[in-house]
Image (spheres, rainbow, N blue to C red):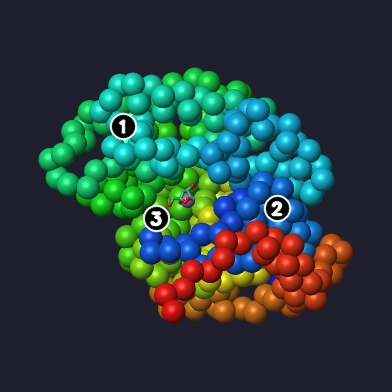
Amino acid sequence: MQSDSALQDLAFEALDSFQIEIPSWGFANTGTRFGKFLQPGAASTLEEKFCDAGQVHKLTGVTPTLALHVLWDLPNGVGDAATVRALESQYGVVAGSINPNLFQDQEFKFGSLCNPSAEIRERSVAYMLDSVDIARKLGSRDISLWLPDGSNYPGTQNIRKRIGWLEEALQQTHAKLGPEQRLLVEYKPFEPAFYHTDIADWGMAAHLAAKAGPQARVLVDTGHHYAAQNIEQIVAWLLHTGMLGGFHFNDRRYADDDLTLGSIDPYQIFRIFHEIQLSGKDALGQIAFMIDQSHNLKGKMEAMVQTVAAGQELWLKAALVDREALDPLQEKCDLVAAEELFRGAFWRDVRPMLKEWRRMRGLPVDPLATLAESGYVQRISVERGSKLAPVTSYA
Ligand code: PSV
Ligand code: MN
């Protein structure tokens, strides 16, 4: 049993070690395959995204970096670096991971790095190399690749050929990395392709990362798994093999739903965090925590602040698992006591400790309430809302 002050020290140490990157696309309008419901406060320029991200960082103190998607945020590639630099100093957050868009151009209809056309594959690799350049120019460590390639019908593509093309492309990309840079390989079992995706699961991603070179790692997006998959076991394996590079956090009920972290299954995030905590502090520097959510119904600023707080709460709960007590229970196969200890940590109300940490660090004690009181969302809604296209109606 720990004393209250030892517990607080442990809690504060855990909270000091937790930072999470926010995505630029989380502030922009988004929707479903069927349409978009526009929010008047949504960001439509890079400056607005930086402004919103800066606000989230001011409120939470733990989101110093903003993930950027190349075509959405840097349409002129390296040419936009100076603009980003200026926005960084203006809004107090810096560019984080750089995410190539290999999905929206018409030429990618049948794939990018795995397209049967050698010409399109070449252009896709060139695009990856540009992304490495952008990242280097901005001082970003991670180039984070989500490959949307795949096929919709059996027999229409040669899966083995595509594996070979992909290995080659990632090796070429890796060769361009600076010594501090990393290539993160994300996997997803379906969408936009529905028969096969070229990087469908963590095994494929780990193989490709290993083939690419020593600075490549796997990125786990919590929304990119089949229902009921044991994600913490995947995380344990990736930690064990030194291949875990980072996370895209979100929650899901059915598919890649992009729901706020912990809104459906907070216990799962707790279990993932527990695996990471077991690996000790040194492993942490090599694991990028990022949010990958874009909300079409919930307010974007509120969703982001809520997500950060949920992440902190779950991280703290996992940090407070009494691992010294758990170990012998596992050894003895004392199932009920081990499970109760584990579950007990999950059910501990850590919110008062988190509030105290915020107070001690000079941060708003209740960031969601402070956001509401600040009038920020109303202000941006008025300022940006006038740019909205008129609403269409069938009446
Ligand atoms: C794809 O579903 C994904 O998870 C990738 O990480 C993209 O970068 C992100 O969502 C935004 O579309
Ligand atoms: Mn993702």
Q: Is mark 2 on a helix, strand or loop?
A: helix
Location of mark 2 (residue): 48
Location of mark 3 (residue): 224
User: 169 and 233: which one is in front?
Assistant: 169
Asked if 172 appears above or below 257 in the picture, the reply is above
* Mark 3: amino acid: His
Residue beneath the point at 55% across and 38% down: 70
Find residue 352 and name its label.
none
Question: Is the CB atom of the residue marked by disc 3 within 8 angstroms of ligand 1's nearest atom?
Answer: yes
Q: Which of the 4 quarters of the picture holds residue 147?
A: top left
Q: Where is residue 31 in the image (x, y as percent from the top left)?
A: 47, 62
Taking the image as drawn, is residue 4 in sight?
Answer: no
Earlier sequence position, callout 2 versus callout 3: 2
Location of mark 1 (residue): 114
Q: Position of residue 347 (x, y in %)?
A: 57, 79
C-alpha separation, residue under disc 3 versus residue under disc 1? 20 Å
* Mark 2: amino acid: Glu
User: 36 and 339: which one is in front?
Assistant: 36
